[in-house]
Amino acid sequence: MIKKLLIANRGEIACRVIKTAKKMGIATVAVYSEADRDALHVVLADEAVCIGPAPSAESYLVVDNILRALKETQADAVHPGYGFLSENAGFAETLEKQGVTFIGPKPLAIKAMGDKIESKKLAMAAGVNTVPGHTEAIRDPDDAVTIANDIGYPVMLKASAGGGGKGMRIAHNDEECREGLIRATNEAKASFGDDRVFVEKFIEQPHHIEIQVIGDSHGNVIYLGERECSIQRRHQKVIEEAPSPFLDAKTRAAMGEQAVLLSKAVDYLSAGTVEFIVDKNRNFYFLEMNTRLQVEHPVTERITGLDLVELMIRVANGEKLPLSQQEVRLTGWAIEARIYAEDPFRNFMPSTGRLVKYLAPIESDVVRLDTGVYEGGEISIYYDPMIAKLIAYGKDRATAIENLQKALDGYYIRGVNHNMAFLAALIAHPRFATGNLTTNFIADEYPDGFHAKDLVLQDPHIMIAVASVMHHTLQNRAAQISGQISGHPRAVGGDWIVILRGQQHPISVSGENGNYQVAMDGTSSAVVTNWQFQDPLFVAKVNGSDVCLQVGRQGIAYRLAYRGAEADVLVLRARAAELNALMLLKEPADTSKWLLSPMPGLLVSVSVAAGDEVKAGDELAVVEAMKMENVLRAEKDQVIKSVNAAAGDSLMVDQIIVEFE
């Protein structure tokens, strides 16, 4: 068996591989950039080696640095995780020549499947269904337009070496095709060092469904069911689940058989994923094969009971697969939500900084958390903004959704913006509950972006009851302390006015020692809780049901978050509530005369100069952050007064790029 495993990656996937290696008794080596010196994967590994400066192009992507770490630690195997060098055939080939075991497929399979153009040709030859398209790299924008018109709009421009949503653009017309090619090419070059882009037909209202396969060196390949990955934003998966609520047994078997057929065509060894696009009639077409472990692999592990990383290690060590296709069992339902450091209310712009407060949900039989961060750690500008993957399990889909909602309620992060309110809104959406999922789900349901108005208070009475009990508890505690000091204890009345989103609710609170009754709006709620002052989570039973709210203060208001919705709740005496109604609202600052950087990042280009007249929708600048290019456009017809930053500048959030007259 392998004795020492080097993980050529970082973050949550490095931590996840270390976990299985330790379970198997294999020593582990972490590699890290200077920015990751104090990262969690470094802490968890038995040894750690610095491999260069913060930018991945100078550290995690430098093969020679990984080889030096191998030599220094005498590790006899490498697990690449996902991303970085995981699908680099040259890296796998170099390791093979040096007698180091690569925990992944052979170089030939990586090369064949890692190139989207060549993999499509191979799939066609193997008899696998493929999407209509042009299988040669595009030469220039004019070439792209010609090909797109031959295929028929809409089309998808895709980086040949791409993945993770990078180097992909949808075009509905010639103008979008030209610009999309430029953006896809730039992202592909920056992320993969390969700027080839090809065109294929974009299938509208599709499902994105992938089949997990694993093969050994003895010619055995099996598939482990499917994953529904249709909930995407900008081609980046947001929520994944297994099984798919859309597939039937016949389609599942047909897709699985084609995935195995393709895998055997390249003598596939290790874990891999064959991705398909599926139309509304369950016709399916091959998209690509990822010759690595997928981000969303935990949902497959949960419903099959298998450890995919362990299987990868064992087959790389020459062992046979421990089960046949007939022995694969899919039990229950699992859903994964990707927790990102980004601001969903500012067009999902990445957020960087220190995790000032970090309380993760408690793992159990129904909750799993894969993460690479900890309280006090940093979210860096240099890497993907993923904080964690939160996985929930249930005997059926409805139960899995409910368990995921509860886990999100108890996931407390402060210091950086995050997308948990968005995730909570998605899984609470009636359309999600019915399983009516397509890759257009987010674009359909949130066409103008995600806003505070999209957060619906599922049960306002819960927030009212919790704020009332908090206030009652704190007021009584203050009275006790005052009485101890003065020697004259006094009781605090429990009649208040609760103001929630502009609506006043008279309430009365009674009880003590964790058992309370809250009378409001003609009803009474029983609240049982052990909450204490400064606890960031209010865990309780409200009328017998378990609830968990994130709590804090905003001035004199209680700031509460529940099921993704956040609200500031005032609890006041009747006279104070009357006066509060007379308070003027502070108008937000007018920033319309400036183009501000929506995120920290690199200013790739500025498309305007002082004196230029621009029309609504015109490109003003491009900012790159966390490997993605973001085009900033004019919101209305304006004249440029001055340009305050230049291409190549590093920008802070809200830094002025352009001033308008």
Image (cartoon, rainbow, N blue to C red):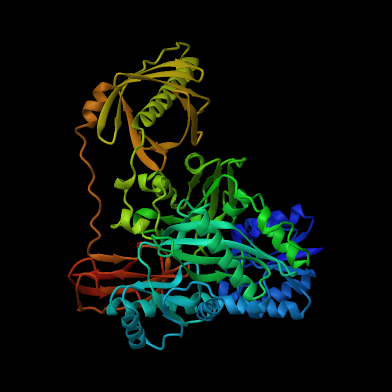
Which one is in front, 188 or 263? 263
Determine the residue positioned at 78% across, 64% down. 319
Q: Is residue 628 left or right of residue 265?
A: left
Which one is in front, 606 or 228? 228
Camera sees residue 53: no
Determine the residue positioned at 36% across, 56% down. 442
Q: Is residue 437 left or right of residue 244?
A: left
Q: Furthest-top residue in view?
A: 488
Q: Furthest-front residue in view?
A: 250
Camera sees residue 538: yes
Which one is in front, 551 or 61? 61
The quadrant the N terminus occupies is bottom right
Q: Quadrant of residue 223?
A: bottom right
Q: Position of residue 528 (x, y in %)?
A: 49, 22
Q: Position of residue 494 (x, y in %)?
A: 36, 17
Determine the residue positioned at 38% across, 80% down. 182
Q: Position of residue 246 (x, y in %)?
A: 45, 53
Q: Position of residue 491 (x, y in %)?
A: 41, 13
